[in-house]
Image (cartoon, coloured by chain):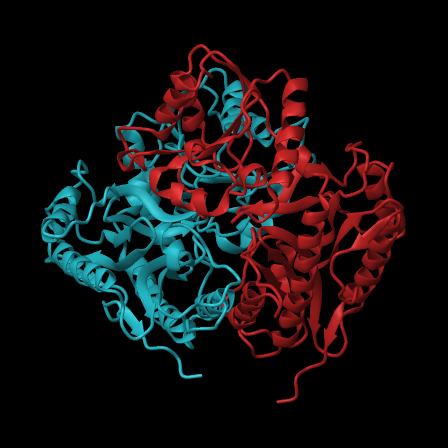
Chain colours: A red, B cyan
Amino acid sequence: MTLFEKSEYLTRVEKTKDRMEKAGLEVLFVSDPANMNYLTGYDAQSYYVEQAVILALDAEEPLWVGRKMDIACARFTTWLSPQNMMGYSEDMVQSRLKHPMSYIAGLMIEKGMGKKAIGIEMDAPHITPRSYEVLKAGLPDAKFQDARLLVSWVRSIKSPAEIALMKKAGMVVNRVMQAAVDTIQVGVRECDAAAAVVHAQVAGTDEFGGDYTSHMPFFCAGKRASAPHLTWTDDPFLNETNINVELAGCVRRYHCPLSRTIYLGKNPPKMLADTAQWTIDALNAELEAIKPGVTCEQVDQAWRKAISHAKIVKESRTGYSMGLGYPPDWGEHTCCLRPGDRTILQPEMTFHVISGIWMEDWGFEISESVLVTETGYELFANFPRQLIIKGQASK
Amino acid sequence: MTLFEKSEYLTRVEKTKDRMEKAGLEVLFVSDPANMNYLTGYDAQSYYVEQAVILALDAEEPLWVGRKMDIACARFTTWLSPQNMMGYSEDMVQSRLKHPMSYIAGLMIEKGMGKKAIGIEMDAPHITPRSYEVLKAGLPDAKFQDARLLVSWVRSIKSPAEIALMKKAGMVVNRVMQAAVDTIQVGVRECDAAAAVVHAQVAGTDEFGGDYTSHMPFFCAGKRASAPHLTWTDDPFLNETNINVELAGCVRRYHCPLSRTIYLGKNPPKMLADTAQWTIDALNAELEAIKPGVTCEQVDQAWRKAISHAKIVKESRTGYSMGLGYPPDWGEHTCCLRPGDRTILQPEMTFHVISGIWMEDWGFEISESVLVTETGYELFANFPRQLIIKGQASK
């Protein structure tokens, strides 16, 4: 059973075909699992082997191709007709002698795509250089063109059904961040707090379950808070320590990321407290700048202007579009809130607006996930926007 | 602080250089996060952006290159000297105008690698066709060669320190599978059982914490058990249903996978009970065939011979080498237990020996993770090897 109505998928296919036509493409070879899911509903943890959704301008339905045993996964999750699910045999899986892309190329020739203009997602996750080379070699008369982000740009504007799921993910992330705040205490091991977090992520709410997230929770305590992408350790949390927590709620692959910094101890150091205040003020200013018609760099500029009085140097972006995703990323790789990105905000875009401050031996993080509305923005989560101070646990 | 002694990493680098010399390579460009970790210790969830470990035959230390902010992650997790950690600027991250690989190519020219024979992991996760093309364009005088699996083959033989970690992962997976068995009951939502599982994975034991696993748990109940790679739903478990559970324990990125089928109800259907018995007998025969000197296909053959009396058609492999891994896979992609793989088993290889039977509208799974010893094999986990029957919960 598919997640959305068939009409929703048909609309997505039509929008994708429009972009294909404009780009001069007759066939689109979709490798990004998020884009495969977007067009067909396909949802399985099978992206460690070669697979693709192939959309031809002159075909009504896309074609799903993967490992033969995963056709069963396609049957359970996509709206496609059985004849549009094709599988390669087991001797091609992680083989030193055969490659699934030669099967897929042969199939494309059979389907009349051998001389077409074919778009490839050249920078998508889960397509390798060898896959591309074998595919090209198997389709010597085709014209290849980079079509990276073509579907991702369609995805950047969410439908009402997608927004409803992201609101659910927001409800999940409220609980998930609360689980982190409740569990992080002096003497508790980082892994035990992380365990409470992943439990809350997957359990979801009483009304709907949660999904796994494209990034596992980032837990960076003490000096490790200077590094943005570490996970938990076995060490107990110490008193007078700050912990950066970045995580998400996820419902049916739709994410709502959120980050907060927690301080264990009664009195955070002045530098941390000041940075928190400056950064939250800047995040507030940035959120207020969000509305249709402004550019991504204008939104980012609001953050930079608001914090310019402080001696904080931040080279990295202050947000990015996100939503549907598979490991390794919940970001869509389309819009970035940073200098130079002149993409114009439109209603139904969704962003993770994140202020990460990573210093020499400490750090501070705060973020919100937002929907761009007709007049401004709306938050997906609802969690106190502050440095969370937990006085030392009485022992 | 690195996970292993520096001497362990130096040994790995030497073994890798030996293979590079035999392959005629002067430089190895390592993209697989598991291989990057293996050579340097690097462990961060940053593989959603471009990064690499570059090993030159004539250099003592490998070079880590990634996003500038992730140098902090390298400082916390690798044994490399600070001058061997290089980062590209933020304007290259997911940019439409610039690509990190052009920075990396420039750096390689600076380091005197511009005219070298360079090995690329052409089929590794987390290197895209575009990354490869930009790298090649930036190094027009280099000779490129496919070096996929070169490091993975070094990894296939585990050190005592690695085996110790995998034994810990075995202790974790015992608890994780028990959490699944305890939680899966009639009326419990699949997501709530999955939540208990991920909690147990991350919490680990009282002595050491757990890590996130490269695959999230596979939970396939009822008819969905015919599909190998689905995750959980929000639905409650029903009476008289079988559930395929495949999951792992993981400690510091080292995995111990395990699968079992659970039946809810007093009397499993005869076909399921018979299949379970035949398959477990075949798995036992396969395990007994494991010892140094035999080939992968001989081990697989023992399974096929033992089950030949039953009318079970299984095209897929009955096991694969595994250990260190990042999403999307805990498999090493080197040895497969299947016809045609004549790799000779050696002591300290590690396999997930898995009998997955996926039929038209049901399925059965059982597996063990094993270490090849001097004389045979040793199990990493210790969990009853049977169809687990849970009589209907009294309500």
Residue B262 in the image, given as x and y percentages of width and height: 33, 67
Residue B200 horizontal side relative to residue B159, left or right: right
- Is residue B5 visible in this depiction of the protein? no
Quadrant for the C terminus of chain B in the image: bottom left
Q: Which residue is drawn at the image coordinates 49% and 67% (left, top)?
A: B236
Q: Is residue B137 visible?
A: yes
Residue B62 is left or right of residue B348, and the answer is: right
Nearest the eye: A72 or B54: A72
* Residue at (61, 47) in percent of width and height: A4
What is the x, y in percent for residue B170? 32, 66
Point out residue A24 in the picture as x, y percentages from the top left corner.
63, 15
- Residue A57 quadrant: top right
Q: Quadrant of residue B93?
A: top right
Q: Nearer the viewer, residue B378 or A294?
A: A294
Foreground residue among B316 and A365: B316
Left or right: A260, with B375 as reference point? right
